[in-house]
């Protein structure tokens, strides 16, 4: 996540699905001959290659972990988009949790990751997205013996919160550096400290640990999001107190409790006590040990982060003498942020770095000390306000959109050094390399020691391969850019080449989140998008296929983007915004007229052949307008889902041809088709559940456009394709490529047969190409 939203509003609850092999929807009858059975089996799946539409980053990276015994082995965790492993040769990240399926979508949120220093092939991830009812599933610890290529999972009796407040604290999961059968996990929600003694296969609560935490960001939050107890924040082993094969004796644990933040065990976790003399009044986001010099460094904030934090301190605890010392880089009077992002240079242990993670204005701050915190220098400082002097230079040419197209006035700069910088790690084998996470990317440097010599170190994105965006909508015009996207937090992009990073997100205006995008079917240069912006406008129009934009005016009462539709010829637009009713405009949003006959909050789409026809849907009723959206009429069609999200689209080039997907688990749920503008809908047989529908180029020799859906068909959840108008379906993804929740949007490519673009909630836009032999 880059911004301040919780990214939970559109997620569905976990759905029941049965993994396995797909059978075609129209299975042969019991009397079918062997040839028909063989044909059905061959149709059961299609070989596909899957890649990401390149954006490079886009979301919050709250954790980076280097293995301390193997060079170049590093992992990154994201709040909703899974975990990644660094590939040194290509300098890219490889996704590790794409196998997470629909029913376990919450396991794409990673609250902590741990790399085993005894057996570096082993890696562990504590997963779960929300601790409130936004995620109906429990948390889990996933374990891998092959660096995340494959996983085994142990379910936990409580939830974990990879996208909850406090997620930048940590790491909450840790492997004993001497006896790697032993792991600790800090739990939220009052569940305390947990331990495994069999390499993560089973877990039990550490009954002797005295404090489950008590800090809540907002105890009065009725959703349970900000009111949850943030629990146990981090676990740190003192490797100097153990030997190979025996448990480390001294273990430090950080707790979300402003008065009792740090605990210690000196008997391998049998007993625990509050560390005497510790500072109070703040939360310890990080606890990092320099065992060589005998110092435990602690980064404190008055809030749990990652968005909040107005005061902070940095302390040093001498493990041999018990002395506490305030080593904060700035005085309390000069501090307007909390500290996090703490790291020690393992090649030069007296060198320590820490971030002012919540310094939103004018920029994040990074501090560095070469004398164990005795003195500090900042990555930037004021000369004569508002002018800044920096110890670094930035080069974002590989990900140019990180400038946001901004031209800020000093003391702000573009691009920013970062924000939400709760993860910062110096490579334990290379003092020149440092990586840190922000709300949108991973930055890093390869010449960090220039900081100490008076030169300038260079900061560049180190994020290629790490794709973390939540996708709300997709459009694939027949000409112009092959793909237009509507994304959470960073707005969206015009993708002229899906293999390259776009130069800039949509601007003029720049929505924080785009909720809906559409183009005119017969005039793809005409595009409209709507979204969220703190102080409007929340609708924008383009005359050049999304390259340039101009803002429209809003009807009164608009509070959010909602959905929008462009007529087939681009002469009219219908908008169903949050906060007010459906409206229509024939002058690109210069003025709006309230539509009649359709309820507020209805989803809207256009007919892709008749420019006067628009459609709407809400709560089981389908609405049609034949006068450009001025008036709508409810159709008598029945049997459609009245509960749960519904997404529908009209077939390009075919008047009145509508496909509707959606519903609610346990209720009416599936895929429906109408050829008479919604007067009648027929349920597509064999499709038990469907959440999206999209169209692409027809298969060679077929008279039907290709259908794509994220659905459950014949007991299997997956991404499916039909080349015969829904008579039969082929699963085109596999169990290694499931990406959690894929229920927001899907579209085929009108120019390339077999290509499909799939939305995810945290793994960006994935696209697939058919690898079937010609």
Image (spheres, helix red, strand yellow):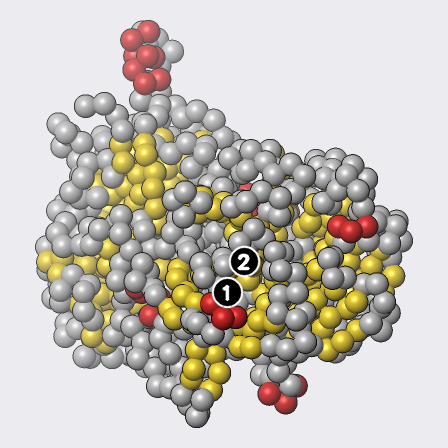
Task: Please say whether residue 457 is visible from this viewpoint.
Answer: yes
Q: Considering the numbered disc 1 on the image, is that residue within a helix, a strand or a loop? A: loop
Q: Residue at x 53, y 77 (%)?
A: 378
For residue 625, say whether it is visible: no
Answer left or right for 606 relative to 40.
left
Residue assigned mark 1? 449
Q: How many marks?
A: 2
Task: Identify the residue at horizontal 22%, vertical 30% (top origin).
Answer: 724
**Up/down of 618 relative to 113, above or below:** below
Closer to us: 252 or 590: 252
Q: Left or right of 627: which side holds 48?
A: right
Instruction: Indicate the position of residue 603 as horizontal and vertical percent values.
Output: 33, 60
> In the image, is residue 196 above or below residue 110?
above
The numbered disc on residue 407 is: none
Secondary structure at numbered mark 2: loop
Residue at x-position 19% and y-position 23%? 774
User: On the image, numbered disc 2 is attached to which residue?
Assistant: 431
CB under 8 Å between callouts 2 and 1?
yes
């Amino acid at each position: 996540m880059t911004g301040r939203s919780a990214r939970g509003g559109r997620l569905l609850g976990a759905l029941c699905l049965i993994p396995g092999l797909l059978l075609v929807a129209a299975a042969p009858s019991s009397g079918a001959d062997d040839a028909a059975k063989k044909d059905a089996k061959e149709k059961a799946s299609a070989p596909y290659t899957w890649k990401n539409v390149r954006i490079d980053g886009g979301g919050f990276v709250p954790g980076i972990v280097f293995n301390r015994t193997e060079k170049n082995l590093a992992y990154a965790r994201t709040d909703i988009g899974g975990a990644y492993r660094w590939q040194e040769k290509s300098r890219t990240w490889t996704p590790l949790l794409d196998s997470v399926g629909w029913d376990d979508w919450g396991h794409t949120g990673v609250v902590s990751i741990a790399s085993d220093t005894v057996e570096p092939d082993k890696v562990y991830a504590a997963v779960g997205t929300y601790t409130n009812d936004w995620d109906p599933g429990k948390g889990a610890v996933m374990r891998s013996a092959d660096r995340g290529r494959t996983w085994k999972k142990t379910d936990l009796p409580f939830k974990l919160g990879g996208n909850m407040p406090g997620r930048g604290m940590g790491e909450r999961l840790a492997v004993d550096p001497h006896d790697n059968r032993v792991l600790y996990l800090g739990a939220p929600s009052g569940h305390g400290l947990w331990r495994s003694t069999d390499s993560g296969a089973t877990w039990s609560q550490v009954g002797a640990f005295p404090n489950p935490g008590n800090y809540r960001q907002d105890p009065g939050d009725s959703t349970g999001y900000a009111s949850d107890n943030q629990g146990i924040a981090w676990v740190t082993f003192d490797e100097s107190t153990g030997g190979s094969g025996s448990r480390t004796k001294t273990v430090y644990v950080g707790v979300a409790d402003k008065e009792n933040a740090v605990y210690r065990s000196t008997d391998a976790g049998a007993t625990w006590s509050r560390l005497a003399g510790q500072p109070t009044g703040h939360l310890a986001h990080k606890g990092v040990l320099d065992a060589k010099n005998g110092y435990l460094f602690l980064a404190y904030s008055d809030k749990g982060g990652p968005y909040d934090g107005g005061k902070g301190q940095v302390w040093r605890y001498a493990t041999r003498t018990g002395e506490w010392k305030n080593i904060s880089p700035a005085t309390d009077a000069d501090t307007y942020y909390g500290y996090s992002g703490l790291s020690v240079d393992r090649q030069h242990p007296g060198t320590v770095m820490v971030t002012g993670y919540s310094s939103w204005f004018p920029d994040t701050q990074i501090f560095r000390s070469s004398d164990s915190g005795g003195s500090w220098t900042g990555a930037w400082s004021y000369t004569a306000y508002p002018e800044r002097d920096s110890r670094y230079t930035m080069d974002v040419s590989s990900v140019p959109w990180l400038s946001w197209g901004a031209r800020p006035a000093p003391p702000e700069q573009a691009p920013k050094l970062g924000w939400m910088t709760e993860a910062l790690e110096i490579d334990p084998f290379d003092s020149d390399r440092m990586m840190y996470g922000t709300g949108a990317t991973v930055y890093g440097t390869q010449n960090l020691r220039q900081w100490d010599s008076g030169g300038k170190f260079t900061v560049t994105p180190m994020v290629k391969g790490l794709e973390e965006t939540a996708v709300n909508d997709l459009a694939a015009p027949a000409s112009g850019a092959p793909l237009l996207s509507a994304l959470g937090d960073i707005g969206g992009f015009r993708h002229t080449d899906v293999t390259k990073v776009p130069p800039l997100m949509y601007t003029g205006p720049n929505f924080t989140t785009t909720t809906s995008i559409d183009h005119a079917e017969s005039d793809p240069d005409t595009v409209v998008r709507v979204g969220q912006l703190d102080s409007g406008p929340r609708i924008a129009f383009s005359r050049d296929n999304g390259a340039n934009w101009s803002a429209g005016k809003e009807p009164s009462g608009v509070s959010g983007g909602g959905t929008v539709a462009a007529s087939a010829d681009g002469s009219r637009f219908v908008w169903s915004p949050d906060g007010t009713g459906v409206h229509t405009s024939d002058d690109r949003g210069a003025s709006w007229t309230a539509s009649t006959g359709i309820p507020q909050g209805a989803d809207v789409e256009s007919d892709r052949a008749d420019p006067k026809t628009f459609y709407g849907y809400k709560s089981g009723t389908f609405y049609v307008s034949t006068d450009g959206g001025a008036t709508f009429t409810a159709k008598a069609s029945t049997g459609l889902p009245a509960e749960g999200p519904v997404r529908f689209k009209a077939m390009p080039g075919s008047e009145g041809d509508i496909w509707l997907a959606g519903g609610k688990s346990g209720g009416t749920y599936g895929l429906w088709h109408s050829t008479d503008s919604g007067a009648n809908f027929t349920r597509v047989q064999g499709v038990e559940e469907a959440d999206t529908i999209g169209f692409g180029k027809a298969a060679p020799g077929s008279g039907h456009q290709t259908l794509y859906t994220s659905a459950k068909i014949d007991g299997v959840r997956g991404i499916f394709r039909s080349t015969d108008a829904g008579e039969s379906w082929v699963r085109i993804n596999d169990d290694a490529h499931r990406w959690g929740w894929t229920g927001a949007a899907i579209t085929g490519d009108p120019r390339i047969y077999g290509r499909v673009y799939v939305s995810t909630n945290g793994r960006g836009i994935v696209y697939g190409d058919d690898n079937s032999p010609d």
